[in-house]
Image (cartoon, rainbow, N blue to C red):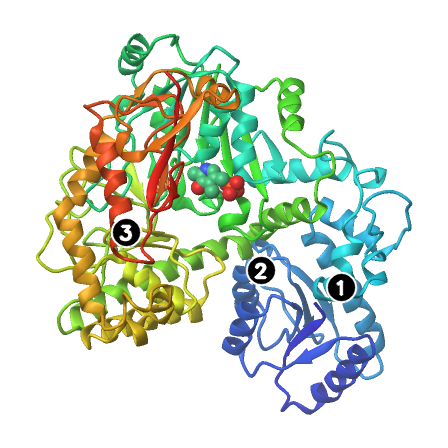
Amino acid sequence: MNTIAILNNLGVFFKKYPVQELEQALATRGYKVVYPVDEKDLMKLLEMNPRISGVIFDWDTYSLDLCQQINQINEKLPLYAFANEHSTLDINLADLRLNIYFFEYCLGSASDIAHKIEQATEDYKDSILPPLTKALFNYVDEAKYTFCTPGHMSGTAFNKSPVGSIFYDFYGANTFKADISISMPELGSLLDHSGPHKEAEEYIARTFNADRSYIVTNGTSTANKIVGMFSAPAGSTVLVDRNCHKSLTHMMMMTDVVPIYFRPTRNAYGILGGIPKSEFSREVIAEKVANTPGATKPGYAVVTNSTYDGLFYNTQFIKESLDTKFIHFDSAWVPYTNFNPIYEGKCGMSGEAMPGKVFYETQSTHKLLAAFSQASMIHVKGELEEESFNEAFMMHTSTSPQYGIVASAEISAAMMHGNAGRRLIQDSIDRAIRFRKEIKKLRSECDGWFFDVWQPENIETTECWNLNPNDKWHGFKNIDEDHMFLDPIKITLLTPGMNEDGELSTTGIPASIVAKFLDQHGIVVEKTGPYSLLFLFSIGIDKPKAMQLLRALTEFKRGYDRNMTIKSFLPALYQEDPQFYANMRVQDLAQGIHDLTVKFQLPELMYKAFDVLPEMKMTPHDAWQQELRGEVREIPLSEMVNEISANMILPYPPGVPVVLPGEMVTEQSRPVLDFLEMLCEIGNHFPGFETDIHGVYNVDGVYKVKVIKQ
Ligand SMILES: *Cc1c(COP(=O)(O)O)cnc(C)c1O
């Protein structure tokens, strides 16, 4: 981080030589100097190069306006102004948060100035590094030798083995030096919440607007279990979003609770809609309790916010309406909501605490901020019994947590600080909106078909767009007023084949084929529906990546329109079954899958499959215990009706469970089975298009499930 930008009018003789001297003095201290040609060039340089650690400029030529511009980018960046004795100060400068130092032009002072710049750079780094990471780096710098775990001893063990040293060289020395044992008192402890770890949690809580935050080193899968198992004692009733992540099903298998479900809507595209307002009311919940054997008034509720497809709730409404002590927002996909005003009122930590209630927000820091995999956070607002909560936390946490994961969680928070942080999220939003417009533009200019975007007519305003009950674009029936909002950075592209009412056209391009094509071009789609593809514009998506995606989409269109052979257009798919795909062309494949979709009336089937829930015969916990006791048998999927499923059955997509352990698919809920069988059938017809269904096993071409012995 040792690059200094000098913005200087070099034509002026008496300024030229001191600057040259300074460059030499800086070079001897290991600094590089770059010379932007003008202000605009400097701003571009700063925007693109976060490693620049200071700007030197001429106070007489620039001053206020330049300071304001730099401030927008990074208010902590050290600025060095050369001033002569006639310089004046602009009073408006006092309003700016600046980190500025003044120097005079004169020969012979370069070494002193370079020394001061070096100090200021160190102070700058110190001011932006968060507490735990700083302590960890200092610890590594001091190169202490210890005789405890981990056994590789700063990597030494790897370097004694040929294969070990290949591994060591790949990751680099610091990875191993910073991988240290929990017993370093100067770093405190994640499990006891002490020392720099405690400071890190406090820093994170301030950053995310929480009363209390916890760093979780095993993903939101674990964060959800910690929260759920603390908030729902055995025997109690829990209110769970039916579109929940599987970690919450696992939570219900681990602890003996009675689930009742929030019933979300969905549209014909297979996009998971939100939970209607009525589902949060006392009356509807009381009715569900009355209809569920063993259920009592729930004390804990969990809602997925945002949904997988990027729909946020009006969380203020949920917090006010829901009559449970603990309200948990599973926000694994949206750790960035606190850093842009468009998410205000749509996330767990916005707004104030409410007496008698505790709000949680669990976030996968690694999913959409910058952190190592598995970095996750639990944020809490409200009064929590911390000692007991910590028991639940420790129950799910290794006694040897990975410091790298912990530090990366803290860094992700630090990255969100100040103008530099806000700009990162704003840039993502702007980039996503530009991409949406670009798709619309290409669509209007294209001959024939092109991809469409799932969004309102008008996206001129930067906001989370309201799903208005009177609008048609979203395809949801009876949606509530002022309740659901679409996140601009979650982009769902639509392929031809179906309209928003679920009417299938005679021809179509199933999205799974596009996903295969993109995959071959190094682009991984987040989620693929029958005629929809989901892309996330996280802060890691830069302009080249967005361009590459656009280019791949236009290339798909070209190849499709020219009706290329599968062999040349989708070589990896061809390899899955060269005989089957021998003479097939892409339009035949698309039409083949589309025809199956029409034959099975997929949109309607999918809608119905989620419309009538299977019947709960025993709790997920009891079903799991039965399985552990061996009280299960394997039967063909097709014979599932009137049997109790031992496992959770969860197809990808849509990635949410359709049958939970202990549930029976009855005659009324038969569409669930029809839906699963159809997914299997598409896979049987077209090699390479098998749907991954958790809980269903393909045994020699027959799909099997585990059911409880009755
Ligand atoms: C991904 C996800 C999780 C689990 O998060 P990990 O960090 O992968 O463990 C939980 N809930 C939802 C809604 C998710 O999408």
Q: Quadrant of the C terminus?
A: top left
Q: Residue at x 71, y 40 (%)?
A: 401
- 694 versus 536 height, above or below: above
Task: Point out the tag, 3 or 2, that comes first from the N-terminus.
Answer: 2
Q: Amino acid at mark 3?
A: Asn
Q: Residues within 10 Å of mark 2 (few under 14, many from 20)?
A: many
Disc 3 element: helix
In percent of width and height, residue 178 lies at 77, 52
Q: State the residue position of label 2.
A: 74
Q: Residue at x 74, y 54 (%)?
A: 126
Q: Amino acid at mark 2?
A: Asn
- 286 versus 422 height, above or below: above
Task: Point out the tag, 3 or 1, that comes first from the N-terminus.
Answer: 1
Res. 111 mark: none
Q: State the residue position of label 1.
A: 163
In percent of width and height, residue 160 lies at 86, 61
Q: State the residue position of label 3.
A: 684
Q: Left of 303 or right of it: where is 583?
A: left
Q: Residue at x 40, y 25 (%)?
A: 661
Q: Residues within 10 Å of mark 3 (few under 14, many from 20)?
A: some
Tell which of 369 and 92 is nearer to you. Answer: 369
Q: Are marks 3 and 1 in contact (CB under 8 Å)?
A: no
Q: Left of 143 or right of it: where is 644?
A: left
Q: How many marks?
A: 3
Q: Disc 2 to disc 1, how far (Cα)? A: 44 Å
Task: Point out the tag, 2 or 1, that comes first from the N-terminus.
Answer: 2
- 322 versus 62 height, above or below: above
Which image quadrant for residue 322?
top left
Mark 1 CB in 8 Å range of ligand 1? Answer: no
Q: Are marks 2 and 1 in contact (CB under 8 Å)?
A: no
